[in-house]
Image (spheres, grey):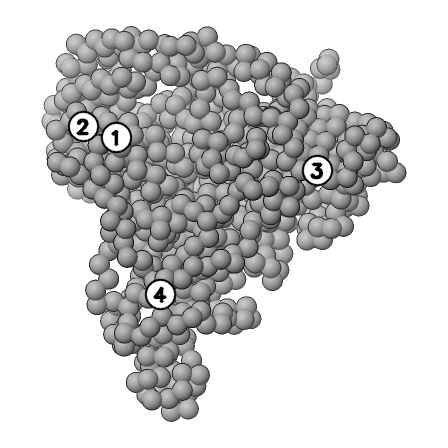
Amino acid sequence: MAFTIKVNGNTHEVDVDSDTPLLWVLRDVLGMTGTKFGCGIAQCGACTVHIDGNPVRSCLLAVGLIGNRAVTTIEGIGATPAGVKVQNAWLDLEVIQCGYCQSGQIMSAAALLANNPHPDDSDIDATMAGNICRCGTYVRIREAIKRAAGEA
Amino acid sequence: MRVLENLPLAPSRRALIKGGMAGGFVLAFRLPLRAAPVNELEQPLDDTAGQFAPDAFIRIDHTGKTTLVMPQVEMGQGVYTAIPQILADELDADIAKVALEHAPPNDKVYGNPLFGIQATGNSNSIRAFWKPLRIAGATARAMLVRAAAEQWQVDPASCSASNGTVTHAASGRILAYGDLVEEAGRLPVPPPPPLKDPKDFVLIGKPVKRLDTPAKSNGSVVYGIDTMLPGMKFATLAASPVFGGKVKHVDDGAAKTVPGVRQVVVLDDVVAVIGDHMWAAKKGLDALVITWDEGPHAQVSSAEIWEDLRGASKKDGAVAKSVGDIAKGLSQGQKVDGEYELPFLAHAPMEPMNCTVRLMPGACEIWTGTQVMTRVQQTAAKAAGVPLDKVTVHNHLLGGGFGRRLEADMVDSAVRIAKHVDAPIKVVWTREEDIQHDIYRPVYRDVISATLSGGKIAAWKYRVTGSSIMARWFPAGFQNGIDIDAVDSAVDIPYDIPNLQVEYVRAEPPAVPTGFWRGVGPNNNVFAIECFMDELARKAGADPIAFRRGMLGSTPRLQAALDLVAEKSGWGGPLPPRTGRGVSVQPSFASFIATVVEAQVDHRGEVQLRKVTSVVDTGIAVNPDIIVAQLQGGLIFGLTAALFGEITIEKGRVRQSNFHDYRMLRIDEVPPIEVHVVKSGADPGGIGETGCTAGPPALRNAIYAATGVALRRLPIDRAALAVGHKV
């Protein structure tokens, strides 16, 4: 089946089954590998993208359900005000280690800041608890979100 | 080609040899300063024509672009910044003009001097390469200076180098390295020049920005799993759920009707589905009806494994270290016994196992992320049935290693599958396959007996029982019945104890494959030692820090770290009910670390982390910010295991399968973590694994302080900590 999806402002036509998760459409069909596969069951958040600005786990989002809504991925998040702030704060504070989960972390943090420009610790916990980092960069993620919010 | 023979031995190995492990372990120390004639069996080095390439690590072209070849792999621990800092400092290069390249597989040129092969592990990259890289950088700098001096017809000693240029101060002349490439390339390699005085370091010791992270912040980084090739197909696989089982029958009727499924490959031990994308492959795999011949391990259970291990731990072991008179020492004073047990653990790096293979007539090309380049090459050559020199390996940044990528099993199966497919394939394991077919941190049992006399330890007998990973992975490390990794921090015990014996009993679990896991042997040793120290302190009626401090006289760096952590953690200050502070100290990986964890235990036995404070003396801190990050992350990695980590076996299968039942700490469970880096002039120690080792005993001792319950197994048993629990 053919679907038209809009990713980072570009329109793509893809021919896959309607139940194909967006994650595999992005990675394997469109070759946009910035979005990561971590668990396949929405436990780790590595595959987080935005659908109309809201963070979504793309490993469980069937491509057939997206319709006209705008998909934003790590490759495009730097074009948004919150996204670029988060990316800069991540580098300023050297959050990143192996980096594999960080696409998802940055996408979750950018959505948090876009919807709540001054999150407190409990807001950060509530939003970011869905993203696992095996390198244990959480302490710096917390600092970097505050830095990006202009508070630290 | 030069051979360096005087690299310092890691302390643990030195202690072992001192402790009487005669004739066993010989480390291969060699590091060529000029790219050796390439062995015909190994992947050729890239062409360096037109560049100044004085050794295997440095290439400068006429624009001044300085390419540094990375002999160790980057898996988050920061070597792709620390190694360039060391090289560029002695080279006096302009760090802004530095580009990095992954080294090709070549043990002779890029072998880790402490392993003798090209491997990244045991937190020893900086220890192994500290001196050789400084010499490599300084030698290249000397050649560039000489080239400039000859051109100016002045004494090289009157010239100086900095930031990618050579200057003759007296005449005000200056030349960029790029302009000296040709001249310098014609000079003979001189004997190693003097190295910089540490006070002249420009990059070493500074929190230089990581070189690998910009690409990791915008999706442009390419891990092995991101490999895309023209015409490539996507594959996922299933091995027998029971360890060692074989394929008996596969009904692929339904799988072949899944849109996008191209092929089903049935091997002796593995079934794979090939598709147009991962989703097709995965749906196809789920649609297969596979009957397995489960083999001899179908009834293996955790209960049986523990029973065997406990039995084995009653035997006398091979003596790894002996000091004083242990029998006499144990017969006098107040006797205390302790037994500690650690579970199987999976690695679960965020990037699941994967390998991309392109087979051509007589040749094989591999894309993956590995800690063992040459083993990947050897494994692929064997599986593909092609000569070693016909295997090209493209390494990548690793999405986590933690020891899992010290193995090449994912390469072996991928190549064997690829032999049946008429296209390049990328094999990606599901997370379930990754958890259920890991090569696990072994179960360990530690039995310690000690005597107390006058508030100090008079005798200490420590028997380690568990799998020998060395026997399989690095046989030189298993000699005379002793696995040097399994007893590493047991023989390096930092306390002054007059009568001491360390023993090792090898006990291999049936069926379950075992391998290195972040923190390796020291995780187990330090946990047992530091838990038992708290029990001894309590028996002696002493404060845990004061008790330790009195026996650290011959390890002053650790004593100083302990003093500082007591101050920084607020040790002894008031705490709410059921809240405690616990301490641990360790000399492991040649770094001296003291850690305090503060934790609270609620009435149900749930544990909340409140604060972690760590003091680290790792010698010269090449990049202090990366050291802090490694401690923070390592502590979380270790505390995750202490709180949740356990792989259990039932009917020969791993019961856990994904992050819902193999739990990870999340941001809302992580407390503030404060790390203090001590200034030191000693050679650098290891860092990547140290936090992982430090966290669990400090947490357990905090729980002991909070509740009085002396836990002796991991993970934390909440039921035993609940109010009103009856032992």
> Hey, which quadrant is residue B145 in on the image?
bottom left
**Marks 3, 1: nearer the viewer:** 3
Q: Mark 2 lies on which chain?
A: B
- Location of mark 2 (residue): B419
- The three-letter amino acid code for the residue at tag 3 is Ser
- The three-letter amino acid code for the residue at tag 2 is Lys
**Marks 4, 2: nearer the viewer:** 2
On residue B96, the disc is 4
**Marks 4, 3: nearer the viewer:** 3
Quadrant of the drawing holding the N terminus of chain B: bottom left
Measured in 3D between alpha carbons, the distance from the residue under mark 4 to the one under mark 1, in whole angstroms, is 42 Å
Label 1 packing within 10 angstroms: few (<14), some (14-19), many (20+): some
Seen in the picture, residue B104 relative to B623 is either above or below; the reply is: above
In terms of sequence position, does the residue under pointer 3 or pointer 2 come before the other? 3
Query: Residue B265 versus residue B704: which sits nearer the camera?
Result: B265
Q: Report whether B656 appears left or right of B576.
A: left
- The three-letter amino acid code for the residue at tag 1 is Ala
In terms of sequence position, does the residue under pointer 4 or pointer 1 come before the other? 4
- Mark 3 falls on what kind of element? strand
Label 2 packing within 10 angstroms: few (<14), some (14-19), many (20+): some
- Location of mark 1 (residue): B383
Residue B704 makes an appearance in the image: no
Measured in 3D between alpha carbons, the distance from the residue under mark 2 to the one under mark 1, in whole angstroms, is 9 Å
On residue B157, the disc is none
On residue B322, the disc is 3
Q: Which residue is at 40% across, 21% downward?
A: B436
Q: Which residue is at 72% across, 25% downward?
A: B338
Q: Do callouts 4 and 2 point to residues on the same chain?
A: yes
